[in-house]
Image (tube, rainbow, N blue to C red):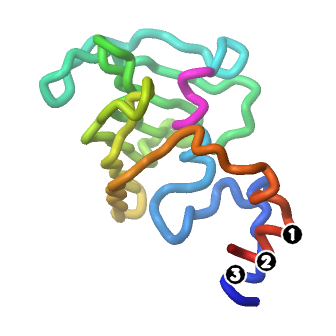
C-alpha cells in the first residue's frame, strides 16, 4: 500500500501499551490531555502541598482516580501557581509505588494554550526514559474528520 502502514491499532485495547516504543503509554498521553478537565467524579483531589519547581511557585495536587479504569492508583501533579500549567506528574501504581515521572518544559503559548515543547517521561520501575522535543505544534488546524476514518488510516496519505 503506497504511503500507508496497512494496519490499524485499536487504542481501546492498547491504552496501556507503549506509544511507538517510548516510555509514554497511550493512557499516559490521554491522562495528561484530559487531566485539567477531570471532575470530582473522575478523581478525588486534594492539595498535597505548595512547592516550587525550577524556580516557579507550584501547587502540588494529589489525585486519586475514582470510577476511571486507569492503571494508576494516585497521581501527584505540579501546577504552576500563576497559570495552572502542568509542569510535572508523578504516576503511582495501584500498590502506591512510584511508576513514572513526567516533566514538561520549554512551555510556550500556542494561541491561548500554554504548551510544553519538551517532555520527558522517566519509567522509574524499568529505569528507562524518553525525551520528546517538538519544533512545531498546532491546534485547531482544520483537519477533516474523514482523515481519521478506518479506510483513510489503512490507505495512508
Q: Are marks 1 and 2 in contact (CB under 8 Å)?
A: yes
* Rendered location of residue 98, percent (x, y): 42, 42
Which of the two marks, 3 or 2, is nearer to us in this view? 2
Q: Secondary structure at mark 2?
A: helix
Pointer 3 or 2: first along the chain: 3
Q: Please, is residue 115 above or below residue 15 in the view?
A: above
Write the start and end of the magenta stretch as one range: 32-37
On-image quarter of the C terminus? bottom right
Which residue occupies the foreground of this view, 104 or 127?
104
Numbered disc 3: secondary structure:
loop
Looking at the image, residue 113 sits to the left or right of residue 68; the answer is left
Residue receiving disc 1: 151
Q: Is residue 106 left or right of residue 139?
A: left
Reply above or below: 80 against 13.
Answer: above
User: Of all residues shown, which one is farthest toward the right?
Assistant: 151
**Residue at 47 percent of width and 65 percent of height:** 22
Q: CA distance from mark 3 to mark 2?
A: 8 Å
Residue of label 2:
155
Please identify the quadrant where the N terminus is shown.
bottom right
Mark seen at residue 5: 3
Give me the residue at 63% from left, 26% from top: 65
> What's the residue at 58%, 23% (across, down)?
64
Q: Is residue 123 above or below residue 73?
A: below
Q: Nearer the viewer, residue 154 or 29?
A: 154
Image position, residue 151 (x, y; %): 86, 69
Amino acid at each position: 500500500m503506497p504511503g500507508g502502514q496497512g494496519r490499524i491499532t485499536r487504542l481501546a485495547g492498547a491504552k496501556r501499551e507503549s506509544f511507538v516504543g517510548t516510555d509514554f503509554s497511550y493512557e499516559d498521553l490521554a491522562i495528561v490531555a484530559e487531566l485539567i478537565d477531570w471532575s470530582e467524579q473522575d478523581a478525588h483531589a486534594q492539595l498535597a502541598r505548595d512547592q516550587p519547581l525550577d524556580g516557579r511557585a507550584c501547587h502540588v495536587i494529589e489525585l486519586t482516580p475514582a470510577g476511571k479504569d486507569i492503571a494508576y492508583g494516585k497521581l501527584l501533579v505540579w501546577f504552576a501557581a500563576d497559570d495552572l500549567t502542568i509542569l510535572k506528574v508523578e504516576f503511582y501504581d495501584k500498590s502506591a509505588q512510584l511508576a513514572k515521572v513526567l516533566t514538561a518544559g520549554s512551555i510556550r503559548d500556542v494561541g491561548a494554550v500554554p504548551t510544553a515543547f519538551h517532555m520527558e517521561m522517566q519509567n522509574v520501575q524499568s529505569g528507562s526514559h524518553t525525551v520528546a522535543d517538538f519544533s512545531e505544534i498546532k491546534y485547531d488546524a482544520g483537519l477533516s474528520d474523514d482523515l481519521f476514518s478506518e479506510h483513510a488510516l489503512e490507505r495512508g496519505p
